[in-house]
């Protein structure tokens, strides 16, 4: 859902000249600005490396739910895969900005009780040690899907009523997927003073 929403905003943006989507299956979208690579093994990018040069940013929206996954497998698919992808891109695009989709509740200390939060925290911390032009970690909370897109979890239809309540209470908990996508774009084109962006920061940056 996040990847589709960010892609939607990228294709609408006049500031973005070209978008390359890399996925295990086609995103099913045709657009003059869009290129696509279908690739199965994200741990081995050697076959497509030549197609990854010349880009200004990576919006890394790949992720896996912790539900039903062992800590070891979650680390492999969250930390190991992300770092491998980022290190490969760094070799090809040293001036790239890397934007990582993390999550609310991520543990930057890497010492907390929840394994998923520690793993996400380690991923954020180690990405920020890489010498990209800039690295940002986006920590969304509740995301209101963009109307008309197809990849929103069906459960969202049952809980969307909570969005206006959360938004009325505070901007700490919920944003729209449109705001999220615009914030990622603006982090590259305009920059931001923080590397870790909570929901409040995401909303603020989306308005720049």
Image (cartoon, grey):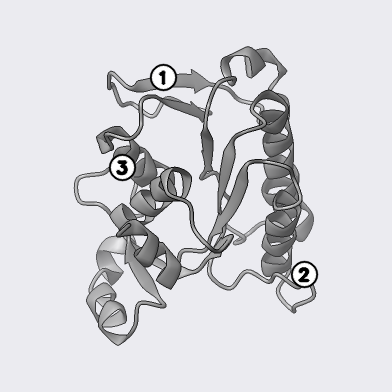
Picture quadrant of residue 74: bottom right
Q: CA–CA distance between discs 3 and 1?
A: 15 Å
Percent of width and height locating residue 111: 80, 75
Secondary structure of residue under mark 1: strand
Percent of width and height locating residue 188: 47, 44
- Look at the image and tell me in which quarter the C terminus lies: bottom left
Q: Relative to residue 145, is residue 97 drawn left or right?
A: right
Out of 18 and 24, give the one closest to the viewer: 18
Q: CA–CA distance between discs 2 and 1?
A: 37 Å
Out of 95 and 140, give the one closest to the viewer: 95
Q: Please name which of the two marks, 2 or 3, marks the residue nearer to the observer.
A: 3
Q: Residue furthest bottom?
A: 169
Residue 187 visible in the snapshot? yes
Report the residue at 55% width, 44% height from top: 62
Report the residue at 70% width, 50% height from top: 127
Q: Find out whether the residues at labels 2 and 1 contact each other: C-beta distance under 8 Å.
A: no
Q: CA–CA distance between discs 2 and 3?
A: 32 Å
Residue at which label 1 appears: 35
Q: Find out whether the residues at labels 2 and 3 contact each other: C-beta distance under 8 Å.
A: no
Secondary structure of residue under mark 2: loop
The relative height of residue 197 versus residue 105 in the rendered view (above or below) is: above
Upstream in sequence: badge 2 or badge 3: 3
Q: Find out whether the residues at labels 3 and 1 contact each other: C-beta distance under 8 Å.
A: no
Residue at which label 2 appears: 110
Residue at which label 3 appears: 9
């Amino acid at each position: 859902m996040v990847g589709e929403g960010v892609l939607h905003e990228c294709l609408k943006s006049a500031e973005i000249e070209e978008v390359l989507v890399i996925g295990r299956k086609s995103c099913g979208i045709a657009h003059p600005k869009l290129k696509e690579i279908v690739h199965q093994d994200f741990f081995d990018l050697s076959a497509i490396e030549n197609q990854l040069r010349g880009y200004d940013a990576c919006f890394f929206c790949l992720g896996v739910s912790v539900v039903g996954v062992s800590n070891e497998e979650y680390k492999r698919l969250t930390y190991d895969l992300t770092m491998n992808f980022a290190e490969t891109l760094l070799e090809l695009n040293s001036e790239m900005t890397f934007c990582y989709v993390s999550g609310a509740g991520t543990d930057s200390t890497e010492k907390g009780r929840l394994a998923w939060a520690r793993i996400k925290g380690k991923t954020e911390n180690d990405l920020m040690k890489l010498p990209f032009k800039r690295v940002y970690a986006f920590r969304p909370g509740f995301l209101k899907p963009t109307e008309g897109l197809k990849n929103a979890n069906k459960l969202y239809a049952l809980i969307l009523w909570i969005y206006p309540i959360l938004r009325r209470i505070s901007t700490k908990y919920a944003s729209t997927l449109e705001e999220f996508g615009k914030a990622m774009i603006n982090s590259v084109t305009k920059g931001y003073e923080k590397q870790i962006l909570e929901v409040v920061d995401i909303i603020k940056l989306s308005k720049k």
